[in-house]
Amino acid sequence: MNKAELSKILLDQIPEGHHVVAAVMTTYTIELDFLELDVVPLLLPGQIAFSANEQVKHFQVGEALREYDLKLEVFCDETMFNAGERRSPQLDYLCHPVNLGNKAFHPKVIWLLCRPDDTEVEDSSARLLMAVGSNNLTQAGWWENLEIQHWETLQPGTQTAEFLAQVRNDLSYLNRLRGQTDNSSTWIPEHRDALGEILNFVTELETVTGAQDSSVWYCGFAPENPRSVPDFLRDHLPREEAETLEIVSPFFAEDQDNQLEQSLCSFREAHLMLPVEGDEKHHQALCYGDYLYNIRKRDNVHWCQWVEGQPTLTPDNTLRTLHAKLFHFQYPTESWLFVGSVNFTYKALHDNAEAAFLLKGPRMAPLLQPFQEELPDVVEDELEHAPGADPREFAAAPSVSVKVSFDWQTGAGRLLLQRDETLVAQPLRLRLRDDAENLIQQFDDVTEDEISIQPEDSGPLSKHLKNSGFLTCCIDPDSINSDPEGWRQDVLVQQLNQSFKPRQRPVLTVQEILAIYAGLPEQKRQNLLQQAQTKLILQQYGSSEYAESDNDKNPYREFFCEYAQIFESFTALQRNLDRYNAEGKGHQIDYYLTAPGVDSLPSLIKAASRSTEADFENDSSEIGAVQETTTPALAGVSAYLILLSARQLLRQYEQHPGVSSMMKDVQHELTRIKTNGRIRIEEQAINGRQDNNRAERFFQWFETMFDMPVQAGSTEEVSPS
């Protein structure tokens, strides 16, 4: 298996002339670094050459994610998430840990909504790609293990009503799991609501007459489907007896006397893949000894290995870890494959949240063959518990569940409480604490299911989230009579609009920002950001020098800031803002007008306002930002023209949140630049007396003319006198 085979398969699924606009993924375990550095780039349009340095790449991917407006949401099992590396998302997407009590949240599903690149093409060409498999969102799951995955394309008229209903039920269930109900306010901004956009697409598909017959069925995980996996299979498989049932699973039921295969279908023989580890010559079985030998005593059930030719070895000739889950029902003329996340355990077949495709096709050759030699020894002491089967990991469903979100743009927070029937009417005292048990915020006599934290009250929460994305929710003992120790829950806070979060960012020069506005190609823009972030990292590690190679040198630093170039850049920025407004992308307008982004208008204004190199070196506008630069201060005239252009643009958005304070900052800088000597106006004597007001009159005249609308054909000349 090629290292990046699943990555390549995903890329191959995206139709030519289309791009991904929304993605939803479910997984049992997750590695956020792998998701952000190796999966998200696959979903972005084009083939951007990102840096090999992980810190630089993180910054680049985050900028591309914002620029391309990709919506992404990920759902994972809360127990496994908390057991892994304790870190929060570094990019602007939503990650939802799911707690199902003593059941595992185990489906491995990908939904990718793709729309045409050409906005004039009818939206009916949009399609939803859907993958179901065994692979987690981890490096091992995508690049190393032996996994299985199947893709389907959902578009008008191609799926049965049953198939679409199952998909819609799952998406609606995820919507409830993330705390979005008909009775709650919408806490997820539209530009981050990947699940909502995909759910709407599927709902619209259901209104179109679909296929009457199909060779693909979907077994979903929503509780609206009360059937177990065996029930689902019995409802869809042929009534006749299967010749052979082949089962590939890394886990088996811990009941050594189980006969779970009997619940799936009637068959003549069952072949069970025996997971092994080791190298090509020395194997050890990953199975409990009692179960291994109980199967040997059965007449029509056999332990098996892959038929010759299956890709089981890694490049260093060790056995690839088996993680695929596959049930092959072989009939005289047909083969039915059940492919997905379902292990061969009681919990997977009856209790856990699982997902799989059932596929019908021509009869396939066997995948497994019975062992001809002695079975390998077992290694029981190294066996992992199957998902949902470890009593130490899964407790009963909590009586209260709290979800917390915080919007960095508005400064507002939100808590959503989901409680069982015993606590519905009971007032609760809720405390938010940090890892050291310090109190962040307290709420007394809580009877509502939703708590809003206004911006003026969110200071402690905001301060905490600058350093950690986690907090602990505690309910005092006297609030829960049934539990003398009270209740606690570790919560991953959903941080929205992270472009507005105070953090250390690289500082671009005026020339670089204007070049981006003027339409810098994306790859060159990424190269520019890569250089800036690399410098920042070097400075963090104590290096004040950055040696550029010839390939690194950026011609846009020589961007000559005369008015023609400034006008061109601001005109291009205005066109983009108009386009965002027409497309309903207010969040992009928010970013360029008021966010502290590397290429936003506030950053340009700040760069243009610097009068000396010391201003560059001590730019403390962001957390921890102390950066050196060899870039000289901008010429006073150029800085003045940029500030005038910024003021002119901002006036069109005076009612926009945050713009009024921006206008005050710009006006302050204009006043400063006109009085600090950065622009010199020749003084002339009038009737032998010095004219001390000439500079003031000139600036007044120039700004009047600058702001005057241009009328075609006008030749009137106006003098500053």
Image (cartoon, rainbow, N blue to C red):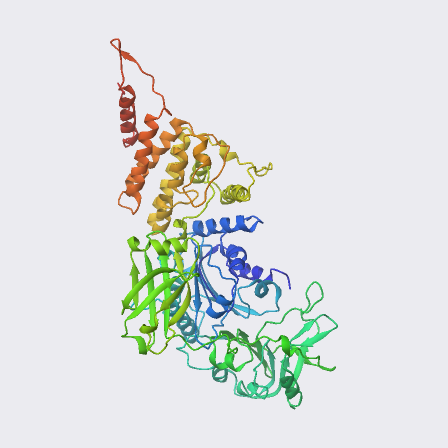
- Left or right relative to 378: residue 346: left
Q: Is residue 615 above or below residue 198?
A: above
- Left or right relative to 233: residue 590: left
- Left or right relative to 65: residue 203: left
Q: Is residue 306 visible?
A: no
Q: Is residue 264 visible?
A: yes
Residue 437 quadrant: bottom left
Q: Is residue 102 above or below residue 269?
A: above
Query: Which is nearer the eye, 604 or 615?
Result: 615
Query: Which is nearer the eye, 375 or 47?
Result: 375
Return the x and y of residue 184 as percentages of the image width and height: 30, 66
Q: Residue at x 56, y 82 (%)?
A: 253
Q: Quadrant of the C terminus?
A: top left
Return the x and y of residue 468 as percentages of the image width and height: 44, 57
Residue 475 quadrant: bottom left
Q: Quadrant of the N terminus?
A: bottom right
Return the x and y of residue 230 as percentages of the image width and height: 50, 83
